[in-house]
Amino acid sequence: TLNTLAAVSVKEVADAKNSVLVYPNPVSETLTIKMNKDLYTTARIVNTMGQLCAVYTLEGKEAQISVSNLAPGIYFMQLSGENGSTVERIEKQ
């Protein structure tokens, strides 16, 4: 019998509890944002020049947003809420 134990840090556990999933990526029409908790209430999409392209209000643990009006390219989605923020890189096809 072989038992293997993996060391998990407190930060990794906290990150897993506060995780967010943004898909599909690359995206062509609709982007889905899934969270373990209602962590983030606002999503801002900025281009690589830092220009604000869109702002969305998020409600609940899952949201779908249309990105069909964005030109193809690389963008950054800034998710923010009361408990902090995170940035996700997205590619629009």
Image (spheres, rainbow, N blue to C red):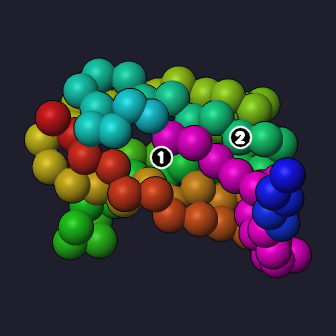
Which residue appears at 70% of the width and 52% of the height? Answer: 19
Is residue 44 part of the magenta span, yes or no? no
Q: What are the residue bounds of the magenta stretch? A: 6-22
Q: Is residue 10 left or right of residue 87?
A: right
Residue 13 point in image, percent of width and height: 83, 64
Q: Badge 1 is on which residue?
A: 55
Which residue appears at 57% of the width and 36% of the height? Answer: 33
Q: Badge 2 is on which residue?
A: 35
Could one spot residue 53 in this view of the protein?
A: no
Q: Is residue 84 left or right of residue 1?
A: left
Q: Quadrant of the C terminus?
A: top left
Residue 17 point in image, percent of width and height: 83, 53
Could one spot residue 30 in this view of the protein?
A: yes
SS label for mark 2: strand
Residue 82 point in image, percent of width and height: 82, 62
Residue 11 point in image, percent of width and height: 79, 75
